Image (spheres, rainbow, N blue to C red):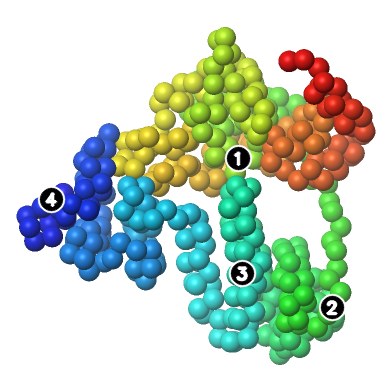
């Protein structure tokens, strides 16, 4: 490391000592050594040591996009050599620059940039500050922005612009394409409010009730995860959290080791504000998983707080990786809906909405569909508050 980061004095500069210590103290030194030989890593580290690459986010944003640059940036944040920035926000800003730069029309580029900045980014920053941001928000913002760009390109193909858009254009957009076009409604509403286009009528799509997996299939999956020791423990834990507690992958990824506690030989998992007792064998599986967590041998993860540590410094596993594991088990969105419906038969919709991190209105609507009447919930909650613990 002293050779690689030599600043001309024969050793690494003192201000890079946290990086040297992190790499040299990694539990898996082979992994750190292998990373140092990745293409471009040595050049970037030497540039930092020589002062040619400043330790600023602006300098890193100016580098060509690559996973190696992203990893080094996050490693430098984890070791305190770069100011802490939300990695997903940095990635979102880079993605924004990439999606805006190819747009030829200055008006379209400005309209989309305004939409991203004042609708998506402004809302994300507000939710980051309040601690209410859901991990899925980044994907939603990207998807809605892509469909907005599709709409602008579609208008261009018709020989018109956003400012010249008519009701006929709006009606044709929604009636002649895939259902994903509905995601353009957010952008259209924003454009109308900002007077970027005429005041037009944006149709409200009917809400369809999602299908649930047959209960027998869900029970069969639970039984398999309870008994099949050939399935990796991480897959069994993730699958059971979906099938038993209707947890979305965005919430599962954010579970921390400290959310698991043991009292009187009973294992509890904190979800939202509730401490849920875990059944056997899930209690055993989750404690074994804590003792044998993956990705703990890298330079930035020796003290990772996450139950499912990711490969990136100080980051949990990605939701996409969790979805792949669930898909391989045969667990789908319909499986989670089946679990959600079953929980609604036992738990009031407002409480369940907190537990699974969904919109209370959605939970109430599902409860209504299932003919669950929780009109007395307020009284029940008041009674629980009055009763001694």
- For mark 3, what is the residue? 116
**Rendered residue at 40%/34% (across/down):** 294
Residue 298 pos. (x, y %): 32, 40
Marks 2,1: beta carbons within 8 A: no
Distance from the alpha carbon under mark 2 to that under mark 4: 65 Å
Q: Earlier in the sequence, mark 2 or mark 4?
A: 4
Q: Earlier in the sequence, mark 4 or mark 3?
A: 4
Distance from the alpha carbon under mark 1 to that under mark 3: 25 Å
- For mark 4, what is the residue? 2
Give the number of the disc on residue 9.
Answer: none
Q: Earlier in the sequence, mark 2 or mark 1?
A: 2
Distance from the alpha carbon under mark 2 to that under mark 1: 38 Å
Foreground mark, 2 or 4?
4
Q: Earlier in the sequence, mark 2 or mark 3?
A: 3
- For mark 2, what is the residue? 200
Q: Is residue 74 above or below residue 235?
A: below
Distance from the alpha carbon under mark 4 to that under mark 3: 44 Å
């Amino acid at each position: 490391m002293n050779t690689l980061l030599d600043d001309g004095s024969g050793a690494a500069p003192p201000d890079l000592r946290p990086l040297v210590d992190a790499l040299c103290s990694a539990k898996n030194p082979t992994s750190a050594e292998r990373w140092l030989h990745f293409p471009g890593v040595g050049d970037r580290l030497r540039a930092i040591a020589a002062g040619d690459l400043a330790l600023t986010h602006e300098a890193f944003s100016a580098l060509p996009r690559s996973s190696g640059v992203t990893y080094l940036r996050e490693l430098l944040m984890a070791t305190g050599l770069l100011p802490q920035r939300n990695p997903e926000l940095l990635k979102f800003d880079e993605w924004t620059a990439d999606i805006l730069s190819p747009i030829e029309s200055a008006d379209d580029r400005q309209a989309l940039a305004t939409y991203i900045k004042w609708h998506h980014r402004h809302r994300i920053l507000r939710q980051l500050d309040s601690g209410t941001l859901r991990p899925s928000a980044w994907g939603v913002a990207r998807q809605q922005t892509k469909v907005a760009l599709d709409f602008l390109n579609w208008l261009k193909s018709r020989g018109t612009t956003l400012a010249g858009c008519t009701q006929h254009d709006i009606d044709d957009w929604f009636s002649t394409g895939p259902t994903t076009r509905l995601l353009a409604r957010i952008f259209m509403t924003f454009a109308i409010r900002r007077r970027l286009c005429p005041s037009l009528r944006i149709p409200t799509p009917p809400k369809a009730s999602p299908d649930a997996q047959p209960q027998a299939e869900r029970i069969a999956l639970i039984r398999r995860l309870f008994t099949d020791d050939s399935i990796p423990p991480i897959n069994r834990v993730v699958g059971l959290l979906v099938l038993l507690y209707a947890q979305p992958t965005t919430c599962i990824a954010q579970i921390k080791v400290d959310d698991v506690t043991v009292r009187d030989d009973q294992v509890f998992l904190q979800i939202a504000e509730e401490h849920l007792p875990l059944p056997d064998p899930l209690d055993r599986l989750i404690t074994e998983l804590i003792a044998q967590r993956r990705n703990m041998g890298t330079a930035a993860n020796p003290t990772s707080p996450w139950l499912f540590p990711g490969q990136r410094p100080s980051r949990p596993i990605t939701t996409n990786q969790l979805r792949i594991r669930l898909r391989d088990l045969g667990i789908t969105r319909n499986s989670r809906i089946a679990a959600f419906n079953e929980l609604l038969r036992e738990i009031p919709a407002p409480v369940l909405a907190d537990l699974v991190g969904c919109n209370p209105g959605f939970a109430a609507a599902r409860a209504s569909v299932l003919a669950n009447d929780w009109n007395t919930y307020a009284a029940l909650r008041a009674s629980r508050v009055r009763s001694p613990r």
